[in-house]
Amino acid sequence: MKKESKNQKKALGFASITSQDNFGKTIITPHASPIFTSSTYVYESAEKAQQVFKGEAEAFIYSRWSHPNAELVENKLEQLETFGLNIKAKALVFSSGMSALSALYQSVLKPGDKILAQGNIYGTAVDYFNQYQETFNIEVIYADFKNLAELESILKAEKKIKLIYTETPSNPTLNCYDLKALSLLGKKYNAKVAVDNTFASPYLQQPLKFGVDFIIHSSTKYLNGHGTGLSGFLVGRDVELIKKQIWKIRKLNGTICAPFDAWLLNIGMKTLSLRMEQHCANALAVAKFLQSNPAVSKVNYLGLKEHADHALAKKQMKNFAGVLSFELKKGYKAGEKFMKKIKLCKLTASLGTIDTLIQHPASMSHSFVPKEQREAYGITDGLVRLSVGIEDVKDVIADLAQALK
Ligand SMILES: Cc1ncc(COP(=O)(O)O)c(C=O)c1O
C-alpha cells in the first residue's frame, strides 16, 4: 500500500472540511450587524472557558443565556429608557411581551402575594393574571387607577400587594395614568410598580423618570415597527436584580428573543424617532377627521384637547402616539359594515406598524376579558381601534371616509 504523504496526513477529511467554519480572510467589522445564529461560543483556551463559566470573564456561552443580537438591542433600549436622565437601568429582551411579563411575575411575586392591576390593561395580561391566581396562589385585584384615593385604601387594607401593574396609554381606551402618583403609592406601601410602555415607546415616555421600578414592552409593536417578528423587553432600575435573578429566570424558562427576531428589532429601532413623529402627526389628523364625521359618536385620542387625560398626557409624554379608538353612532352592526368596507387600513390584531391597522377589541384583542370587566372600562361592543401608520395621511382619511359612508 502506498504511504500517505506528510501533507495528506495533515489535511482534514472530507466530512471535517464540510463541518468547519473557517473564513479565508480576517473579518473586519461589518457595517450592519450580522445575525449570530450560533447556539454556542468557542473559547481560545481551557483557562478562558473556566473563567467564563465561573463568571470571572465575560463571554457568550450558550444562546439561551444570551447572544450578541440580544445584547445589542438591550444596550440600545437601556440608553433610550434613560436618555437624558441620570438613572441607571438594565434591560433584557424576551421572545415576546408576554414572556417579559411572565419573568416579572415570577421574580417579584411569591405564593400568597397579591397584584393590584389596572382593569383596562392588554387583554392577554388580564388572562395571564387570572389564569395563574389559583395555580400560584397570587390573587389579582382590579381597580380603576384614575381613582387614587380608592387605590390607597386598597393598599392600606391589603398588605400582601407586592406589585402594582399599570399600562399607559391604555389599550384600547387610550387613558393616561399618573406614573408619579402610582410610584409614590408603591413606595409608601412597599409594592413594586410596573408599567407597560408599549403604546408610547421610550421616544414619547420614559417611565423611570417618574419613579417606576419596571417597564414592560411588547417590542413586537412600535420598537420593531414593521410587524416582523415577536419580542419583548423587561427593564428595571434595580440593575443587579435584573442581571442576576431575572436573567436567570429567562435562562431557565428559555424565553430569550431569538437572534433573527432581535436582528429585525434592531433594524426597526434605528428609525424609531422618525416613525414616532409621523405616527403622532398622522394620528392627530385622523382623530380630528373622525371627530367631525357624523357617523362617529366618540373619539379617544390623548392628543385631542377634549380628552379628559390630555393635560396629564402632556405632562408625562412628549407626544400622544399613534393609536386611537372610536365609537360608531350605530354601534356593533355599523362597526361590522365599516370594517368590511375598509381597503387601505388592514384588519388585524396588532399595532405600532408603519401601516394603518384596525381592529375590534370586543371580538379580537379583548375577547379573553370578561364582558362586565371590559364594559366597566369603556371597551364596548361598538369600539373600534385604529393604529395609525406613517402613510400619506390623506389616503388614510380617504379610506376611512369611504368606509364610514
Ligand atoms: C400593550 C401590550 N402589552 C403587551 C402585549 C403582549 O406582547 P406580545 O404579543 O409581544 O407578547 C401586547 C400585545 O398586543 C400589547 O398590545
Image (tube, rainbow, N blue to C red):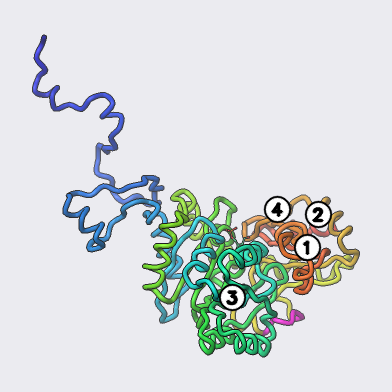
Residue 90 visible to an observer of this rendering: yes
Q: Amino acid at mark 3?
A: Ile
User: Residue at image x 61%, y 67%?
Assistant: 133
> Reading the chain from its start, which is encountered first: label 4 or label 2?
2
Choose top left, top right, bottom left or bottom right for residue 405.
bottom right
| 281 lies left or right of 32 | right
Name the secondary structure under disc 3. strand
Q: Is residue 310 magenta?
A: yes
Residue 402 visible to an observer of this rendering: no
| Residue that mark 4 sits on | 348
| Residue that mark 3 sits on | 115
User: What residue range appears in magenta?
Assistant: 306-311
Does the numbered disc 3 mark a residue whose Cβ is under 8 Å from ligand 1? no
- In this rendering, the answer to whether 344 lies above or below 278 is above
> Reading the chain from its start, which is encountered first: label 3 or label 2?
3
Q: Amino acid at mark 2?
A: Met
Sort mark 1 into few (<14), some (14-19) or many (20+) by Cα contacts within 10 Å: many
Q: Are marks 1 and 2 in contact (CB under 8 Å)?
A: yes
| Residue that mark 1 sits on | 384
Residue 339, numbered label: 2
